[in-house]
Image (spheres, rainbow, N blue to C red):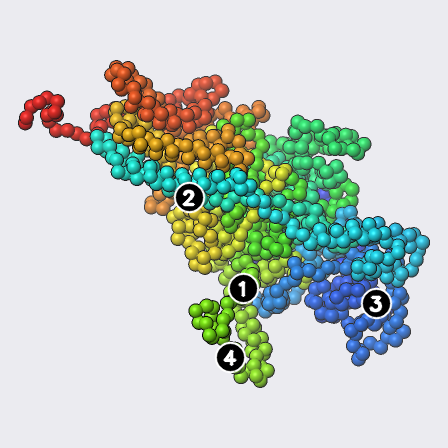
């Protein structure tokens, strides 16, 4: 399907398929007659008899004669698709390995090597020399199974194939050309039966054919020497004969050093310095023992005159100790990592050879364009399209889960602007490549720029972007008023998504291999709009369901082995981010067992003091580094590059087993007795191999029967899941691809399958990211944490207090849902023992941390209660007992300081994180626990709203804006109670004299601890005008007054004494 083919909408269940043309202007494309060589991109050509040249009679893979002869003479002599050895055709010279008895008797061409070759074909021959490596080998069983499925040997109950299937569709989706192995997405143009050109390894800027520094090659090429002599020189160089008289020794040494460098690892672990990590671990162990002694002292020394207060405080302290253990010990093995991008290029981007970097499918999800501005999404898409990665290996998929015509039209404008923006970025190597962020940066943009035309072109591009912004803003303004008859497209067709809850699936390719050219004539990455089908009565599973739909669509259309997912407001800040991830995923040593590479989240537009800890640096720079040293970081929902096979539920490849210890019979205490091989009658008769083959066939047949239940009823998609290195099945026709793409996004496709249970993004929680990563780790995969020097991605975060609390509420509610689900880390994943214990500790902590809100709420109220009742939670302590308290506080501070020392986090960021832990704990986490219990016990479901990504025009205007939410009531109440308690305690000490000041200091310390932690919350309530909203004051004062009066009247935690105290009155009753 071409970029200009139009919007395709359809429903598989209703057997509907509509192609809407005319929404955009049709762009002329280049046309070629006949089939195209899949290696060099030229016409296949004709034979000496005038027929179409067919190199392989087994599969018909289109290859031109020069590439065919070169493969037979210099390559593996096998067809790139079916791996069948090429037979000698009429007009081709005989090579070593040809059979003597051949059907074709072609004596006149047998020794004529140069008869069918021209010097201008040299570049194509060199580019066609594909390298074989272990990274591109497929499992033999998977190949046979994929071939069987592709040829219709599996029955899915969909009826017989229609031989005239292509005739059912318009010319835009019909054609007969076989699909490229590399995963290119190309279709016939509308109204034209000619196929656009395609190249398996086509470059935007092709590499020169001659070797660097090879003077003799260039000289001979200029002099017009024969092709055979130049090819002999090329073979001499590539066979290692570089020591000739024409090659200087320093070039030989340089080539050898480059070869050695390419064989080096692509990344390495950088352990934390022992001078930093060893004291940190010692303090952790010391703190654990101090905590044990402290709790023992607290349990053995109750406060009988305030037993209720003492018991509540001890329970809270025990829970805090348990929570600290879950959070602290997964940080025992923190590590850093380094990547070597130059080695990646040397290994997979060798000059004069096809680019061997793996393709990447990029997923961007959006729902509501009014809360997620289209301009943010456009900047994210533009930064993806301009990444520093081969254009034919990048495909960007946009999931519009709201079926909004505004998103569709904004994406159309983005595709047009990308034709100008992408070449500008690559020409001048600018960073970042999101235009809004690039033009708003207050830096010297002329630094390191040497091209004279840069200033002129930058000014022109800035004007182009401003005009683009105006057009997008006009679309947003137009979308505020929905017409009564619904939205109408430019050609008069009603928009298929007018009913957002009942609409067909929609697919539109805006940019692609065919027709997606920039202003300089270079190719652009693919850009595909996807809106999955939605019907009443079907469960759509929100973001997780949308992501799974993108996985299936991309598996049918491009099927890249790796996938990067981003939120619509997270743009690519480092154009080499994909290369950073490939340093781990394509590393021959560690890459095969890596399920995903997670990047830290970084944010723009946050106030300088980061009042509400939006940057979350303690989690991303401390906790995640610690997990990377165990089994890998958790998946955080965005900025993550996945291995497709891991998302499909496959287990990681098993390494070679260790040889079992064997000993002789004379020493039975060590090792095991070596077992003699049993005699096999079948093996003796030579039938062992045949029986093994029968068993393999049965195993493949059983696998075919299970694939329908696992992946769904799509033969094309199931076939793609077996292609470990990606790529589209070569025999897939454009019509079949389109039909399957609409099929796999239908609303009922996931019924009776394992999608959301074992495959893809896992359902069952609104925080689907935690569940998805947890399932992969339970299968034995490991993940990698990549922190490049320049942040890979940046996004926006809610700086408003109410929005921030609602965001934290959503995360905490998702954790509660996981805790009560069957995937709870407390009881799931023990089978096989593939999840490491410290990794399990971290996952348990991610699900139980909201429950800390209950003891935290009690602990924040206890100081005010002690001040109001003149009681305390601790008895009078001795000098020896006071050492426990001093040692505990010192160990807490020492742990924090040493953590900041090895992680690089500033003390201000650490303190903001501590403050918001209390603010979120007594508000959002508390409500999450209540809502989670209501959902589990009473079945009352709660809906969450998408966090708004827009902000005021004024800098940090949202920071001071007040938005009412019930989450503000508990922290405000705690603040008022503690302030009243402080006033009451000080007044009581003044009235009672000097002896009451000593016990008062301990109570005031705890009360001020609460007030200081809630201080950012208090500033958020006051706003810029230092005025608290009336509704908050009324609720807080009312609740605080009721609580105080009720406490004075009941006084429940103080023991009641019946009758007078005989020791005071002296009366013997």
Q: Which secondary structure, mark 2? A: helix
Calculate the distance from the C-alpha at mark 3 to the C-alpha at mark 4. Answer: 58 Å
What's the residue at 30%, 34% (across, down)?
Answer: 313
In the image, which is nearer the foreground, mark 2 or mark 3?
Answer: 2
Calculate the distance from the C-alpha at mark 4 to the C-alpha at mark 2. Answer: 51 Å
Mark earlier in primary sequence (3, 1): 3
Q: Are marks 2 and 1 in contact (CB under 8 Å)?
A: no
Mark earlier in primary sequence (3, 4): 3
Q: Residue 144 appears in which quarter of the rendering?
A: bottom right
Q: Which secondary structure, mark 4? A: loop
Residue 635 percent location from the top left of the image: 52, 46
* Residue where numbered disc 4 is placed: 678
The mark found on residue 657 in the picture is 1
Calculate the distance from the C-alpha at mark 2 to the C-alpha at mark 1. Answer: 33 Å
In the image, which is nearer the foreground, mark 3 or mark 1?
Answer: 1
What's the residue at 66%, 60% (across, down)?
Answer: 134
What's the residue at 48%, 43% (across, down)?
Answer: 331
């Amino acid at each position: 399907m071409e970029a200009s083919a139009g919007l395709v909408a359809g429903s598989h269940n209703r057997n509907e398929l509509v192609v809407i043309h005319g929404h955009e202007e049709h762009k002329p494309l280049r046309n070629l007659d006949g089939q195209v060589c899949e290696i060099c991109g030229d016409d296949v050509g004709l034979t000496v008899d005038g027929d179409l040249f067919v190199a392989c009679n087994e599969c018909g893979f289109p290859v031109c004669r020069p590439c065919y002869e070169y493969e037979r003479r210099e390559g593996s002599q096998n067809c790139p698709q079916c791996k069948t050895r090429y037979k000698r055709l009429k007009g081709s010279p005989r090579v070593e390995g040809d059979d003597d008895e051949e059907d074709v008797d072609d004596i006149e061409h047998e020794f004529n090597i140069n008869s069918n070759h021209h010097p201008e074909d040299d570049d194509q021959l060199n580019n066609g020399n594909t390298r074989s490596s272990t990274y591109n080998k497929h499992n033999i069983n998977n190949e046979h199974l994929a071939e069987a499925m592709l040829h219709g040997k599996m029955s899915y109950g969909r009826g017989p194939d229609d031989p005239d299937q292509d005739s059912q569709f318009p010319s835009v989706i019909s054609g007969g050309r076989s699909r490229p192995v590399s995963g290119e997405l190309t279709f016939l143009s509308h109204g034209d039966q000619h196929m656009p050109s395609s190249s398996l390894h086509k470059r935007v800027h092709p590499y020169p054919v001659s070797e660097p520094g090879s003077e003799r090659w260039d000289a001979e090429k200029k002099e017009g020497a024969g092709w055979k002599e130049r090819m002999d020189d090329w073979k001499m160089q590539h066979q290692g004969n570089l020591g000739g008289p024409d090659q200087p020794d320093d070039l030989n040494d340089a080539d050898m050093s480059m070869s050695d460098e390419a064989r080096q690892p692509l990344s390495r672990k950088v352990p934390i310095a022992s001078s930093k990590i060893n004291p940190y671990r010692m303090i952790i162990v010391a703190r654990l023992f101090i905590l044990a002694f402290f709790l023992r002292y607290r349990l053995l020394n109750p406060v009988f005159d305030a037993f209720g207060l003492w018991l509540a405080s001890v329970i809270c302290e025990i829970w805090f100790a348990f929570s600290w253990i879950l959070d602290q010990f997964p940080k025992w093995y923190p590590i850093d990592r380094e990547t070597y991008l130059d080695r990646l290029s040397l290994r997979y981007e060798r000059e004069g050879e096809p680019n061997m970097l793996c393709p990447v499918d990029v997923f961007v999800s959006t729902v509501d364009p009014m809360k997620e501005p289209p301009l943010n999404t456009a900047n994210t898409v533009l930064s993806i399209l301009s990444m520093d990665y081969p254009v034919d290996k990048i495909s960007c998929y946009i999931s519009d889960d709201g079926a909004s015509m505004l998103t569709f039209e904004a994406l159309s404008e983005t595709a047009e602007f990308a034709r100008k923006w992408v070449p500008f970025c690559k020409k001048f190597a600018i960073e970042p490549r999101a235009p809004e962020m690039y033009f708003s940066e207050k830096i010297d943009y002329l630094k390191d720029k040497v091209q004279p035309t840069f200033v002129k072109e930058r000014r022109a591009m800035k004007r182009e972007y401003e005009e683009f912004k105006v057009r997008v803003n006009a679309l947003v303004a137009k979308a505020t008023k929905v017409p009564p008859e619904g939205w109408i497209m430019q050609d008069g067709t009603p928009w298929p998504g007018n009913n957002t809850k009942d609409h067909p699936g929609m697919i539109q390719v805006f940019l692609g291999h065919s027709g997606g050219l920039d202003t300089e004539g270079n190719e652009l990455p693919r850009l595909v709009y996807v809106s999955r089908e939605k019907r009443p009565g079907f469960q759509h599973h929100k973001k997780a369901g949308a992501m799974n739909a993108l996985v299936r669509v991309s598996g049918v259309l491009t099927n890249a082995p790796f996938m990067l997912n981003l939120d619509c407001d997270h743009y690519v800040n480092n154009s080499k981010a994909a290369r950073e991830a490939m340093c781990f995923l394509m590393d021959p040593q560690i890459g095969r067992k890596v399920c995903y590479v997670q990047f830290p989240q970084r944010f723009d537009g946050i106030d300088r003091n980061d009042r509400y800890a939006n940057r979350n640096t303690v989690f991303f720079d401390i906790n995640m580094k610690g997990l990377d040293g165990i089994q890998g970081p958790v998946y955080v929902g965005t900025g993550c590059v996945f291995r497709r096979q891991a998302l499909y539920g496959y287990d990681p490849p098993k390494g070679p087993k260790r040889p079992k210890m064997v000993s002789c019979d004379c020493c039975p205490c060590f090792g095991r007795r070596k077992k003699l091989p049993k005699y096999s009658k079948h093996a003796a008769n030579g039938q062992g191999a045949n029986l093994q083959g029968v068993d393999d066939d049965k195993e493949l047949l059983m696998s075919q029967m299970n694939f329908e239940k696992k992946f769904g009823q799509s033969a094309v998609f199931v076939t793609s899941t077996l292609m470990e290195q990606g790529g589209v099945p070569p025999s897939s026709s454009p019509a079949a691809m389109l039909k399957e793409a609409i099929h796999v996004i239908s609303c009922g496709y996931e019924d009776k399958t394992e999608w959301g249970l074992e495959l893809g993004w896992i359902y069952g929680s609104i925080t689907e990211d935690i569940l998805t990563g947890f399932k992969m780790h339970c299968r034995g995969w490991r993940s990698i944490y990549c922190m490049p020097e320049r942040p890979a991605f940046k996004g926006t975060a809610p700086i408003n207090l109410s929005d921030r609390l609602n965001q934290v509420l959503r995360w905490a509610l998702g954790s509660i849902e996981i805790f009560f689900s069957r995937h709870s880390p407390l009881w799931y994943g023990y089978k096989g023992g593939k999840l490491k214990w410290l990794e399990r500790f971290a996952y348990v902590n991610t699900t139980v941390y909201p429950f800390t809100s209950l003891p935290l709420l009690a602990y924040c109220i206890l100081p005010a209660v002690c001040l109001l009742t003149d009681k305390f939670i601790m008895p009078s302590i001795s000098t020896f007992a006071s050492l426990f308290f001093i040692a505990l506080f010192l160990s807490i501070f020492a742990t924090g300081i040493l953590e900041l020392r090895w992680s690089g986090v500033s003390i201000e960021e650490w303190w903001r994180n501590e403050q918001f832990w209390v603010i979120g704990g007594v508000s959002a986490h508390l409500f999450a626990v209540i809502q989670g219990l209501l959902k589990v016990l009473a079945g009352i479901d709660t809906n969450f709203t998408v966090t708004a990504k827009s902000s005021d025009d004024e800098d940090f205007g949202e920071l001071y804006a007040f938005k009412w939410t019930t989450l503000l009531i508990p922290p405000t109440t705690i603040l008022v109670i503690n302030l009243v308690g402080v006033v009451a305690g000080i007044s009581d000490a003044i009235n009672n004299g000097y002896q009451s000041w000593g016990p008062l200091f301990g109570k005031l310390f705890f009360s001020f601890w609460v007030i200081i932690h809630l201080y950012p919350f208090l500033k958020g309530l006051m706003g810029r005008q230092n005025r608290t909203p009336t509704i908050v004051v009324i609720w807080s004062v009312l609740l605080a007054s009721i609580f105080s009066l009720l406490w004075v009247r009941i006084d429940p935690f103080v023991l009641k004494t019946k009758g007078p105290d005989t020791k005071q009155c002296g009366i013997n009753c």
